Image: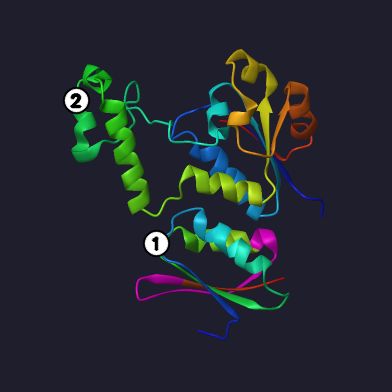
Amino acid sequence: MEQKKMAIIATKGSLDWGYPPFILGSTAAALGYEVEIFFTFYGLQLLKKDLNHLRVTPLGNPGMPMPGGMEKWMPVLVTALPGMEAMMTSMMKKQMKAKGVASLEELRELSQEADVRFIACNMTVELFDMQPSDFIDGIELAGAARFFEFAGDSDICMYI
Amino acid sequence: MADFDEELDASGLNCPLPILRAKKALAALDSGKVLHIIATDPGSVKDFEAFSKQTGNELLESKEEGGKFHFLIKKA
């Protein structure tokens, strides 16, 4: 049987949305899939060596559960106050640790160990004046056509 | 619990870590050897069934005991 393929486009650069590409990528690889993840726009943040800058924000996110059900009564403007983002990020990280959820760094490392290939969108790297030297090792810089070369033959293709 | 060759304690770990650790542990085993996995994530029951079906490594046993989930997987 020919090896199945999964192609993912990762476009989000927040702590919460950084998870799906790495969870699905590493799991698919464990199941025997060949996997490529194409990082573009804000998704490029997920390739930086240090991921401590990633945040989760309650602002404009009505689906985010908050401690004690606060999201049910807290005015939206309060979630915009200085320090809210940092506080929610730290609470989220604590909760993840308590629940045995892997860190993004760990899932990213496990993905690479399992031969998941990471491609950084060249155009957005230049657009944002990002330095490829800020990225982890093993990243390929390429464009949209390179993505289709793999995605065109994929069994699963998703945009995150 | 039947005999096994290696044991992996994935207690306290959440999705997808038990599967990823199991995959790694199986990779180190010879064909026919049996891996015993202990997990606390209730989702791991369905996940190991799915893992076994898709990778061809047979799930010999799956049971809950003392609040933990135990799996025996035979390396294909």
Image quadrant containing the N terminus of chain A: bottom right
Q: Secondary structure at mark 1?
A: loop
The residue range painted magenta reads B53-69
Residue at the spot of label 1: B12
Which residue is rendered at x = 35% and y = 42% of the image? Answer: A93
Q: Is residue A130 magenta?
A: no
Q: Amino acid at mark 2?
A: Met
- Between A148 and A107, the one nearer to me in the picture: A107
Left/right placement of residue A65 relative to residue A148 reads left
Q: Amino acid at mark 1?
A: Gly
Left/right placement of residue A154 relative to residue A49 reads right
Image quadrant in which you'd find residue A141? top right
Which residue is rendered at x = 63% and y = 30% of the image? Answer: A133
Q: In the rendering, at what x and y percent does residue B54 appear?
A: 67, 58
In the image, farthest residue toward the front: A133
Residue at the spot of label 2: A74
